[in-house]
Amino acid sequence: MQRRTLDVVRCPTCLAGSLVPVEAVSDRTVSFGPVHCVGCHARFPVAEGVVDLGAPPAPKAGLGKLVQAPWLARGWERYLRQPFNSALALAAAPLTGAAAAVKGLRPGQQERELIAVLAALAKPVDGPIVDLGCGSGQLLAALSREHKDRWLVGVDSAASMLDEAVGTMREYALTADFLRAAVPPLPFLDRSLAGVVALGLLSFIRDPVVLFAELARTIKPRGLLVLDTIAWHRKAPQTRAGLTAHPVDAVATGLTEHGFIRVESQALGGIQLFTAERP
Ligand SMILES: [Zn+2]
């Protein structure tokens, strides 16, 4: 964890001060903790550079529980996220069966989404780009390869996913900082982020309004947002097995109502990819 990233983290206890290492260290990075809040002195452990801000216990059932499983971390981004999303979009397909996942798989969709994300983030804005729900770090690795000098931060609630993400970055000699936290709220100070990418996150959130408000609070003026959701074109949200499909129109309206500008979206198979900016 780079010290500059600790400078933009908001303490989850007092919702104010940023974090500093408890021990005075001169290094620009912090590999092991703890760190504490400059305001309320709450302490948070650091291991392998990952700052643990705490996350509520995993749900006892559904996909929320499944994504915490260590065995899933290695294959989630590469093989499983897309078929799960597609299966939900198909609505008629039960999420619990492997057959449904295979049926929903659309080869090439994930690659197209990645190209669109990289294009959306091509505009340089000073500050960290945060991958919310970074999972096993595949997107961060791609961003780091494409934009070598970008300041990248991954956030996820699953420790097993973060272990995998740290390993992925190390394996390819790439750099990103990682925080363990459940979102929303976002563990960052107001107007501190150059951009946020959240792929696959919205499906795990029942009430997206809280997330939109947090994105509006934390992204800097002219900062960027890339967000995807299941391409669900009915009027009401639908929840299955812990995943929620939000109406595409409601997502667009929600972003606009929270002050985002240049809200645009494109359909990529079963996924709707939104890009937006802060004014
Ligand atoms: Zn504090």
Image: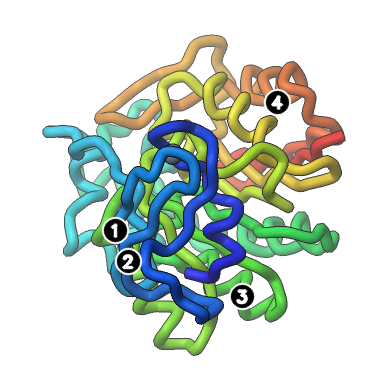
> Residue sitting at 52 percent across and 43 percent down?
10
Looking at the image, tell me whether mark 2 or mark 1 is earlier in sequence order: 2
Question: Disc 2 versus disc 4: distance between alpha carbons?
Answer: 37 Å
Question: Disc 4 versus disc 3: distance between alpha carbons?
Answer: 27 Å
- Label 2 Cα neighbours within 10 Å, binned few <14 / some 14-19 / many ≥20: many
> Which numbered dot is residue 33?
2
Q: Which residue is mark 1?
A: 45
Note whether 55 is above or below 75 in the view shown. Answer: above
Q: Is the CB–ligand 1 distance for label 2 below 8 Å? A: no
Task: Find residue 25 and report its horizontal and vertical position in percent.
Answer: 45, 76
> Residue sitting at 84 percent across and 31 percent down?
261
Looking at the image, tell me whether mark 1 or mark 4 is earlier in sequence order: 1
The reply to whether the C-beta atoms of the residues labelled 2 and 1 are less than 8 Å apart is yes
Instruction: Choose between 253 and 17: the one closer to the eye.
Output: 17
Task: Find residue 104 and report its horizontal and vertical position in percent.
Answer: 40, 46
149 horizontally vs 65: left or right: right
> Residue sitting at 29 percent across and 58 percent down?
45
Q: Which residue is mark 3?
A: 144
Identify residue type, mark 1: Pro
The reply to whether the C-beta atoms of the residues labelled 4 and 3 are less than 8 Å apart is no
Tell me the quarter of the picture where residue 89 sits. top left
Looking at the image, tell me whether mark 4 or mark 3 is earlier in sequence order: 3
Instruction: Choose between 141 and 124: the one closer to the eye.
Output: 124
> Residue sitting at 19 percent across and 41 percent down?
65
